[in-house]
Image (cartoon, helix red, strand yellow):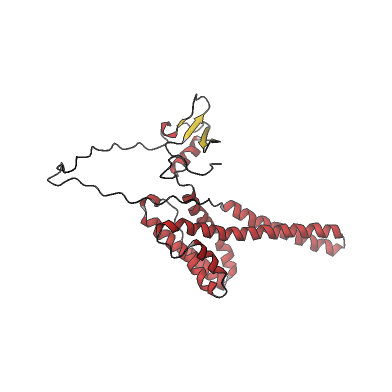
Amino acid sequence: MSTETQWFVMQEDQQLGPYTGQQLADFAAAGNIVRETMVWAEGMENWMPASQIDGLFPEMPLQPPQPAPGSVHPAGNLQATSADPAEPYPHIGVSGASFGMWMGLLFGGLALGIIALVVIAKAEEGGRLTGAATVILMGLGGVGYLLMLISSILTLVYIFRAWKCLEPGGLARTSPGAAIGLMFVPFFNLYWIFQAIHGLSVDWNRTVDAYPDIARAPKLAEGMFLTYCITSLVFPPVAIVLIFPVMAQLCRGISFFAFRPSHHAPGQVGFSLR
């Protein structure tokens, strides 16, 4: 497959792209496009399934003929049997998580707030700050605060989605609603943060290990999640630093489940490649 060809992908009646051949290969390796996904490149008369692109998917191994029930296994006088495949992990209707958007809201709000405060302080020193300018700068600071508030809410939303991803597996210690709601209970939340955040990483890894078809899901660093919980209570400056790798891992994990192809609708992966 040429890496210079510009490819387009049909997703839920929307034409997405263009993408390079390498991007298309990355999407296929991640499971974001499947063999039935329709693709097109300049010079082609019609759209075609992605399975027809040479080298995009590994060759399917030939299945040996299965002996009839009760027949003798070629290797001896034992009846040929095969283990039933494990039940696939249910497809979860959750939206993806964007670490870039979360970080952009946080830093954007922080930057606006700092700029407003610095300008006000400098202007007041020189006695050149008018009433109108004060209102504008205060409004700028207010927008910054609003962006940081949205980022904080988004943190809770992503934690909720992560627990939602675990709910069908039967190994989660709590429900998504309880995970978030109990963090607002005074004093009890000092204990619950370890269940809602560190417990999330433990249950996440247990669930991923228990289901072969989601074995490629990103793991969560249990030690880092535990350290974040501890430092958020005893030394917040360290927790402020750790929140970034914690959220990055959480977003990657949620997006894996959100963009995973459905077992019931091949080719309809329910996400945008843009």
Q: Residue at x 44, y 49 (%)?
A: 91
Q: Is residue 129 visible?
A: no
> Foreground residue, 217 or 69?
69
Pick whichever, 58 or 67, lies toward us: 67
| Location of residue 183 in the rendering, given as x and y in whole percent from the top left corner | 55, 68
Q: Which quadrant of the view contains residue 59?
A: top left
Does residue 217 show up?
yes
**Residue most extreme to the left:** 77
The quarter of the rendered structure image containing the N terminus is: top left
Taking depth in this image into account, of 163 and 1 the one nearest to the observer is 163
Q: Is residue 149 left or right of residue 227?
A: right
Left/right placement of residue 59 relative to residue 105 reads: left
- Residue drawn at the location 42% of the way across and 31% of the way down: 52
Locate residue 233 relative to residue 223 in the image: left or right. Answer: right
Q: How many marks?
A: 0
Q: Residue at x 53, y 74 (%)?
A: 188
Q: Which part of the image, by quadrant, shows the C terminus? A: top right
Residue 57, relative to residue 106: is it above or below? Answer: above
Give coordinates of residue 10: x percent, y percent: 51, 35
Q: Position of residue 111 (x, y in %)?
A: 69, 57
Q: Nearer the viewer, residue 1 or 260?
A: 260
Q: Position of residue 58 (x, y in %)?
A: 37, 38
Residue drawn at x 21%, y 47% as measured from the top left: 81
* Rendering quarter of residue 146: bottom right
